[in-house]
Amino acid sequence: MANDARDRIWRTVSRIPAGAVATYGQVAREARLGRRARMVGRALRALPNGSDIPWHRVVNARGEISLPAGSESASEQRSRLEDEGVEFIGGKIDLDRFRWRPSVDELLWGPPGE
DNA sequence: GTCTTGACTAAGC
DNA sequence: GGCTTAGCCAAGA
């Protein structure tokens, strides 16, 4: 069904470990959606409030929060990330350091069970 | 039914 | 480093 893509996105985002971030494109790729990075944004936007999905670990390809600066979601995202140890430099995240590496993650923690 | 918009990205200037 | 263009596709008007 159509919701399947959204579910895959949410599941992929759920696999992102604390202290790491993933880009929209990366999530899209992991969810087997190819270039549909926008759909990741759509799925995250449609995310119910208070869900267990760590949506805050998803940032754009620049390592920056895509939400409008000053919005509640944006500040909450940044706060949560900083709380998890993600360092913001000039309002941006150094993707070379904090970018999620699925291969490493799976090697260390094992696949979620699929 | 078409047109616009958008939590995007990669490539080209 | 920034701006523009093109690609992709779903939801809202």
Image (spheres, coloured by chain):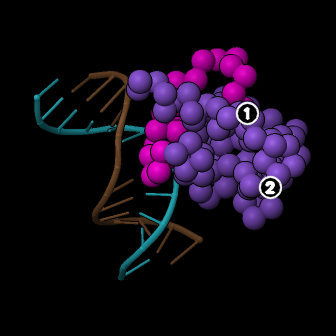
Chain colours: A purple, B cyan, C brown
- Reply above or below: A93 against A66: below
Give the residue displayed 67% in from the left and 35% down from the top. Answer: A114
The residue indicated by pointer 2 is A104
Q: Position of residue A73 (x, y in %)?
A: 65, 30
Chain of the residue under label 2 = A
x then y, percent, for residue A69 = 62, 41
What residue type is disc 1 on?
A: Gly
Spatial CA distance of label 2 from label 1 is 16 Å
In the structure shown, which secondary structural element does the residue marked by tag 2 occupy? Answer: helix
Magenta stretch encompasses residue A51: yes
Q: In x, y percent, where is residue A17?
A: 80, 41
Three-letter code for the amino acid on which mark 2 is drawn? Val
Q: Residue at x 80, y 35 (%)?
A: A80
- Magenta range: A33-56
- Which element carries disc 1, helix, strand or loop? loop
Q: Which mark is residue A113?
A: 1
Image quarter hosting the N terminus of chain A: top left
User: Which quadrant of the structure image shows residue A93?
Assistant: bottom right
Chain assignment, label 1: A
